[in-house]
Amino acid sequence: MKVKSQLYRNSFWGLAGSLVQNLFLSLFFILLARHYSTEDWSTYLIATSVYQMVAAISTMGLGQWFIREVVNTDDKNALVARFLKMQTYFGFFFFIINLIIVLVTYDDFTMRLLSFLFAFNVVFDNIIYSIRNINIAQFEQKKTVAVLSIEACAKFVLACLVYILPISVVTLAILLVLLRLVTLNLFLRIGAPEGIKLMGFWNVKLSLNNIIVIIKEYWPFAIISSAYIVYWKICTLIISKKLPIEAVADFENSFKIFTLAQLVPTVVASTVLPRMVSLFKEGKMGELRKLYMNLFWFFCIYGVGAYTFIHSFGFEIIPLLFSEKYAETAIYTQQMFLTMLIMPTTFLQAQLLITMKLEKLDMWFNVKRLCINVLICLVGLYYIKSLSVVTYAIFISFIILHISQDITLIKRKMLTVLDVSKFFGLIAFLVLGYFWLSKFLNPIILFCAFWLVIGTAYYFLVGKSLLNFNKK
């Protein structure tokens, strides 16, 4: 019971922290987008995109390795020191990779300067990543939440200050790197579990051969853990090279709204994952399928709801959030939200594949999705110079990913061909029906009436079953 209680507390703090941090970081993003010129904001976004993409790869996904090892070792401090030193090595190595990418790709001096500054965060982030995984392994997520919430609040305050003080994007980058350094120091001093010593980790012995052995065994997790961020950020880099720089701001602003919409299915799927794993280990495949299918239809309805909301109110919401200079961004936000029709169920199915110990297959699906997306973007932008090419490429690559998952789950008898047909048929019926009704009804009346009917039908057909299952 004690372990179970620790698990629930750990999950609660992780989810609560994610919600708080997303709130403040979204406000930070919106305030900066409103303040800076489109060109300055786009330059800033490109520099941060390179850093975020490199940082996602730099950890090599070794948090999984550490969490497994720390449970089975007696000398936890020695293992922690080795993990911290290993991640620091990776941080410095990918710091150089970050600089090389920018120097080869961009000629603009401001872009290079911003990228140089943000590259320092790769080193800081890797050490912070290590401490966060230490807290996960020791059931001390609340310490991670506390430190990262302080940082998120500080970023919000900094975004407010740009309206008072003459802070250029370069000065902003310097302040953000210094803030990340402060966050790192907070983690080192107060952010680790009791009994775990962090200071002095650099003195521990760590051979190159030991690092290579670990990477060889866990390399699929490096791809899985970084695939999502790399997928989106490589789109930003392609846009920055193939389209006017203003298109970067349109894409990233749209993506920020998209990330807020996907927070609900991400949180729900993460919360239910332990239950799915438990049912799979116990061999209760019938109960696992029932839970999965109930969530599947919830995610399906949620995706359609998110899309219809942006379709009806996107042209009012986007200028309200980002100012009138980004009024046209709403077009690309609507296009990007086509992906929301299938992204929630795609994420749920990825969780199910991991539950069934098919993470390598999931990895290759994500690699295929990335390659398809890049190929469509490069070929499409050669003929049509429009951001719409990128948004539709994302949608198409997600459809292919979803179908790949569907085929696997049908073979594993977790889905049937009829289930998949119903899924795509229901989405087409609801979206096309909504389009047709929008010709005759006021958007507010249509959205409220449409989802009152759908919500009621869903509750009686699926919702009651899901509530009763969770009570067991």
Image (cartoon, helix red, strand yellow):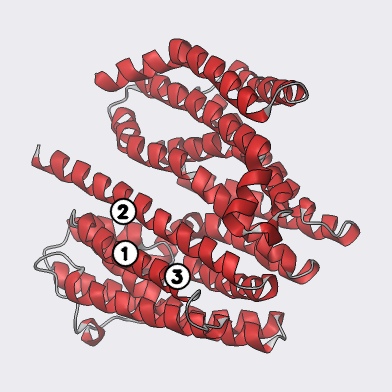
Please name whichever residue, 331 or 389, is drawn nearer the observer in this view of the structure.
331
Residue at 33% x, 19% y is: 467
Q: Which image quadrant for residue 196?
A: bottom left
> Could you tell me if the residues under marks 1 and 2 are in contact, i.e. CB atoms within 8 Å?
yes
Point out the image quarter for the C terminus. top left
Query: Which amino acid, mark 3?
Result: Cys
Q: Earlier in the sequence, mark 1 or mark 2?
A: 2
> Could you tell me if the residues under marks 1 and 3 are in contact, i.e. CB atoms within 8 Å?
no
Q: Earlier in the sequence, mark 1 or mark 3?
A: 1
| Residue under numbered circle 2 | 17
Are there few (<14), some (14-19), or many (20+) residues within 10 Å of tag 2?
A: many
Where residue 207 sits: x, y (%)? 32, 81
Q: In this view, does 100 lie above or below 21?
A: below
Please name whichever residue, 15 or 354, is drawn nearer the observer in this view of the structure.
15
Query: Which amino acid, mark 2?
Result: Gly
Left or right side of 47 for 471 = left
| Residue under numbered circle 3 | 160
- Element carrying mark 2: helix
- Asked if residue 358 can be seen in this view, the reply is yes
Please name whichever residue, 89 or 361, is drawn nearer the observer in this view of the structure.
89
- Asked if residue 403 can be seen in this view, the reply is no
Query: Which amino acid, mark 1?
Result: Leu
Q: Which of marks 3 and 2 is nearer the N terminus?
A: 2
| Residue under numbered circle 1 | 148
Q: In this view, does 422 lie above or below 115?
A: above
Residue at 34% x, 53% y is: 20
Where residue 75 sits: x, y (%)? 12, 68
Q: In this view, does 58 lie above or below 264?
A: below
